[in-house]
Structure formats: C-alpha cells, structure tokens
Image: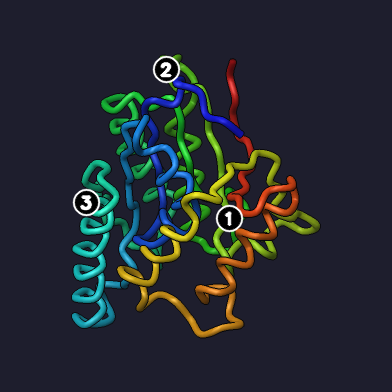
C-alpha cells in the first residue's frame, strides 16, 4: 500500500530492544523520510533479584537500541524500565499512565505495538497498557493503531483458536534487506540459528510469506486495532 502524508508522527511501543525492528523495522525504514518516529521500550529483560550480569546485559542493550535509532535517523528512544519478568496489574496501570503522558506530549497519528494475545507476558502487558493509554478521549490526533507479530511469540497466541490475522500489509521490498542488516549488525546476540523462529533466515521467510499473501515480494503484516478516516 502507499502511505499518505497523514502519517506524520508515528509512535512504536514495544517491550524490548529488537522488537521494534523485528515487528515493524521495514515499515520504519519506509516511513522515516516522511514521518517523525519515536520508539518507547517498556521493559527490562532481567529480574533485579537474580544477578548483576543480567542488569549489565540490559544496559548494553539500551546502548545498542540508541545506536539503532541513530543509525535509522529517528528520534532517540525512551526507556520506561519496567521489570518484564514480573509485571503486575499495578505495573500495567503505571505503564499505561506513563505511555499516556508520552502520547499526549508526542501526539502521534499512528501507533504500532505488540499483539494483545501474544504468548509473551511482557508483550501482552505492553499492548494492554498501550490500548489503555490510547483511549480516544482527548486524542483526536490519534487515527491509527496497528499490532505486529513477533516470531516465536505470535505463531500460537494465548487465546484458544486465535491466530494472528494480518489484514493490513506494508510493502517493504525496498527496505527489508536493510531491516535484516540492522538485526545482524546490532541485534545479532538476540538471533538464533536456523530453523529457529528468531533466526535471520526465518524472519526473512516470514517477510516473504506475508508479501506473498498479497502478491508482493516482501511485506510486514499488521492487525488493525483502530483506523479513523
């Protein structure tokens, strides 16, 4: 599809560094010249009660995520730093308030986030907090909300008989190779060997499958949560 000039401010709300590229990296690269793009990372990937090694790894991932945003020439990311391994109802409420504040400040016309039925708890919590924060009251500027899939987390969703069902597709034939290069260059430690879902080849295969669904060579597919004309 062809994006109109209405896509001027895009907010991408994800749990961890690498989710933004895996979920919608090709779309970011496609839109960055015409849109102001901001990424919010909601969660740490460690439990503070475990050890300092995991904390150090997360801090390193923060640095990498900043480098990725700089490399793509989009806004520097925001880190909310919730504990992704032990999110509670109270945490989701707090997260929603923080996201709401960011939405009201940035005033995006479009949001991309995780699938609400993803089988990873921190992904679901992020999606839920995003939907709470983006309720339409006083947000006439927010026209579109899309959810993306993450390989290894979206193939079998938590709800019985529920499958990820993309009906909105973005042609990324001109940007998907760059997406893969970014994953390999910056997030290689998060990738797995083929045929794991999170291998570089498997991610490319998924891009091709989504493209083939709509007679394109390469695409990212999204579920539509909100679309206002």
Is residue 32 shown above or below 202? above
Considering depth in this image, is 97 or 164 the residue closer to the camera?
Answer: 164
For residue 100, what is the image quadrant?
A: top left
Q: Secondary structure at mark 1?
A: loop
Q: Which numbered tag is attached to residue 149? A: 1
Q: Which residue is mark 2?
A: 141
- In the figure, residue 21 lies in which quadrant? bottom left
Q: Secondary structure at mark 2?
A: loop
The answer to whether 3 appears left or right of 56 in the picture is right
Gap between marks 1 and 2, in whole Å?
25 Å
Q: On the rendered image, what quadrant is the C terminus found in?
A: top right
Give the total number of marks visible in the rendering: 3
Q: Which residue is mark 3?
A: 70
Which residue shows up at 54% across the image and 48% down it?
172
Is residue 12 positioned above or below 58 on the image? above
Q: CA distance from mark 2 to mark 3?
A: 26 Å
Is residue 118 shown left or right of residue 16?
Answer: right
Q: Earlier in the sequence, mark 3 or mark 1?
A: 3
**Viewer-side label of 3, 1:** 3
> x and y percent of residue 141 in the render?
42, 17
């Amino acid at each position: 599809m062809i994006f109109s000039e209405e896509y001027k401010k895009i907010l991408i709300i994800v749990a961890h560094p690498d989710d933004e590229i895996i979920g919608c990296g090709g779309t970011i690269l496609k839109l960055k010249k015409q849109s102001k793009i901001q990424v919010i990372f909601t969660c740490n990937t460690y439990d503070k009660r475990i050890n300092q090694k995991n904390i150090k790894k997360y801090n390193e991932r923060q640095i990498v995520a900043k480098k990725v945003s700089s490399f793509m020439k989009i806004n520097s990311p925001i880190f909310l730093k919730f504990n992704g391994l032990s999110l509670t109802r109270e945490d989701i409420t707090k997260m929603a308030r923080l996201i709401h504040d960011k939405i009201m400040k940035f005033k995006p016309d479009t949001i991309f986030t995780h699938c609400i039925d993803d089988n990873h708890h921190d992904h679901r919590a992020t999606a839920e907090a995003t939907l709470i924060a983006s309720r339409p009251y006083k947000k006439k500027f927010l026209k579109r909300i899309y959810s993306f899939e993450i390989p290894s987390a979206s193939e079998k969703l938590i709800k019985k008989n529920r499958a990820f069902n993309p009906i909105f597709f973005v042609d990324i034939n001109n940007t998907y190779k760059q997406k893969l290069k970014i994953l390999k260059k910056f997030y290689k430690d998060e990738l797995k060997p083929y045929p794991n879902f999170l291998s570089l080849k498997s991610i490319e295969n998924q891009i091709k499958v989504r493209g083939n669904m709509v007679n394109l060579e390469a695409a990212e597919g999204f579920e539509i949560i909100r679309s206002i004309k």
